[in-house]
Amino acid sequence: MNQAVSNCISRRSRGRDERGTAVVEFAIASVLLLTLLFGIISYGYALSFKQGLTQAAAEGARAAAVASTGQAATAAAAAVGPALGAFKKTCTSTGMSCTYSTTVADTGCAAGTSCMRVQVSYDYKNYPLMPKFPGFGLLLPDTLKSTSITRVN
């Protein structure tokens, strides 16, 4: 057999053997990239929700700080609701917990002063904000919680 013909046959058979390689490589790479992308989106949304909880606790504490005597808890509860509304949640939503309590000096409040402690928490493990994806439960927190303490007049 001629050398040129042999090279031509060799190239043709090699081309046929590698024909589906790009599809297989794309399938493997796309699964990994999509998993990474979904992880980034899930973690980012959880972080955004945590920031919303922090904002809600701070709003409740601010409202309690300027409320009239004896109305601090009521004012705090009224202020927390709208701050959670951005995520379509309320303090009575499933998995959500809001507590308002008067604190004493040992919790960061100066001696002889009255303080209001506003705590907002969400059971993320049992009520995830995004669809569950295998393996991400290990990376995301079980509970998202934020606390704010302020002096009450």
Image: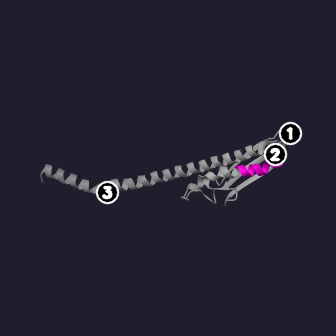
Count of marks placed on residues = 3
Classify the position of the N terminus by image quarter.
bottom left
Residue type at mark 1?
Ala
Q: Write the residue at 21% across / 54% down.
A: 12
> Which residue lies under the disc numbered 1?
111
Task: Indicate left or right for 128 with 73 as reference.
Answer: left
- Label 2 close to label 3 by CB (< 8 Å): no
Classify the position of the C terminus by image quarter.
top right
- Categorize mark 2 by other alpha carbons within 10 Å: few (<14), some (14-19), many (20+): few
Q: Earlier in the sequence, mark 3 or mark 1?
A: 3
> Which residue lies under the disc numbered 2?
68
Residue 85 part of the magenta segment? no
Q: Write the residue at 71% across / 49% down.
A: 79
> Which residue lies under the disc numbered 3?
20
Measured along the vertical axis of the image, is residue 130 above or below residue 115?
Answer: below
- Tag 3, which secondary structure? loop
Task: Indicate left or right for 131 with 21 as reference.
Answer: right
- Categorize mark 3 by other alpha carbons within 10 Å: few (<14), some (14-19), many (20+): few
Q: Give the residue at the far right of this rendering.
A: 112
Q: Earlier in the sequence, mark 1 or mark 2?
A: 2
Q: Nearer the viewer, mark 1 or mark 2?
A: 2
Q: Write the residue at 70% across / 44% down.
A: 58
Range covered by the magenta-colored residues = 70-79
Quadrant assignment, res 107: top right
- Categorize mark 1 by other alpha carbons within 10 Å: few (<14), some (14-19), many (20+): few
Q: CA distance from mark 1 to mark 2?
A: 21 Å
Residue type at mark 2?
Ser
In the depicted view, which residue is nearer to us: 45 or 40? Answer: 45
In the depicted view, which residue is nearer to us: 101 or 17? Answer: 101
